[in-house]
Amino acid sequence: MSRYQLDQSDLQFAREFLADPVGYHSPGLQRVLNRMRGADWASKYVLVTQERHGRWLLGKMPRKRGSEIEIVEGVVYTDLLDAERDIFRRRWQDLTGDDLTTALQSAA
């Protein structure tokens, strides 16, 4: 089965997400998010609450269901929206091989 692949035409949706990570998303952005959240790739980033409403750690979901989440050392967030944006950028990099910040600057 062929999965939707992210490309340069999706940069508009990346901009949309970075501007407003929570709330309503356009159908195009929702398609991008569905791809990023899909179950068919190795290292899916997640947020792990360290302190409720105050500190989050970056984690990677295990390949095997029920195994422990791997915490990425040295990455701590104190702003949830910044954390969501960072995970979006990391997932973009993993799925496209491109640094999102560089891609957005090149496309401007």
Image (cartoon, grey):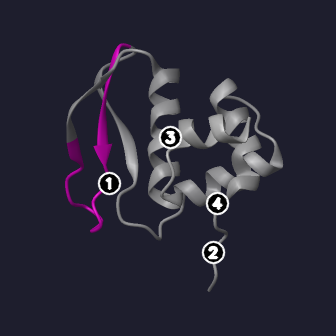
Mark 1 and mark 3 in contact? Answer it, CB < 8 Å: no
> Residue 55: x and y, percent?
32, 18
Residue 3: which disc?
A: 2
- As shown in the figure, which amino acid type bears the numbered disc 4? Leu
- As shown in the figure, which amino acid type bears the numbered disc 3? Arg
Mark 1 secondary-structure assignment: loop
Residue 6: which disc?
A: 4
Query: Which comes sooner in the sequence, label 1 or label 4?
Result: 4
Q: Is residue 20 visible?
A: no
Query: Which comes sooner in the sequence, label 1 or label 2?
Result: 2
Pointer 4: residues within 10 angstroms few (<14), some, or many (20+)? Answer: some
Quarter of the rendering containing residue 42:
bottom left
Q: Is residue 64 above or below residue 17?
A: below
Task: Please tell me which residue is depicted at 52% across the width and 41% down the height of the picture.
Answer: 88
> Residue 105: x and y, percent?
64, 34
Residue 61: which disc?
A: 1
Query: Which comes sooner in the sequence, label 3 or label 4?
Result: 4
Query: Which comes sooner in the sequence, label 2 or label 3?
Result: 2
Pointer 3: residues within 10 angstroms few (<14), some, or many (20+)? Answer: some
> Residue 59: x and y, percent?
29, 42
**In 3D space, how far apart are the residues under numbered discs 1 and 4 (Cα atoms)?**
21 Å
> Residue 31: x and y, percent?
72, 56
Quarter occupied by the C terminus: top right
Task: Please tell me which residue is depicted at 25% across the width and 61% down the height of the picture.
Answer: 66
What residue span does the magenta drawing correspond to?
A: 54-71
**In 3D space, how far apart are the residues under numbered discs 3 and 4 (Cα atoms)?**
13 Å
Circle 3 residue = 89
